[in-house]
Image (cartoon, rainbow, N blue to C red):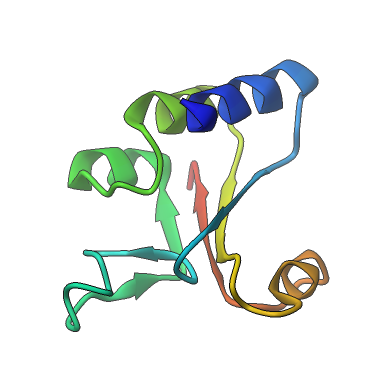
Amino acid sequence: TTDSAAALRAAEIGADALFKGTQVDGVYSADPKKDPTATRFEHITHKEVISLGLAIMDTAAIALARENHIPIIVYSIHEQGGLGQILRGGGRCTVVSDE
């Protein structure tokens, strides 16, 4: 998939992070469009994403990022200026990392 290709490429170039633009502003406990009680994570580990079965990316991509210690930044592609805010240390996103 494109997720696995992105994670592989990030590992190949020694990327500091992998940015995942998506329909929502981070990683949730369930699909927030279907479950109004879903909670958003500010931070979650690669291992937790896999063990909870959260479908933010395919499992191979998450595992590859984990094995190479590459954080995944999940953010909304619909928020005007959102990526710029995140790059400046603000904005709304979820960080998926080792710790």
Place residue 17 in its image quadrant: top right
Residue 87 drawn above or below residue 20: below
Q: Give the total number of marks visible in the rendering.
A: 0
Residue 25 drawn above or below residue 1: below
Q: Nearer the viewer, residue 24 or 29?
A: 24
Q: Residue at x 66, y 78 (%)?
A: 91
From the viewer's perspective, tell me whether residue 46 is left or right of residue 85.
left
From the viewer's perspective, tell me whether residue 70 is left or right of residue 98.
right
- The picture places residue 49, in percent across and down from the top left corner, at 32, 46
Q: Residue at x 43, y 33 (%)?
A: 62
Q: Residue at x 76, y 77 (%)?
A: 81
From the viewer's perspective, tell me whether residue 7 is left or right of residue 88.
left
- The picture places residue 46, in percent across and down from the top left corner, at 41, 41
Q: Is residue 66 visible?
A: no
- The picture places residue 89, in percent across and down from the top left corner, at 76, 71
Q: Residue at x 63, y 78 (%)?
A: 79
From the viewer's perspective, tell me whether residue 18 is left or right of residue 27.
right
Residue 6 drawn above or below residue 94: above
- The picture places residue 32, in percent across and down from the top left corner, at 27, 73
Place residue 57 in its image quadrant: top left
Q: Is residue 90 visible?
A: yes
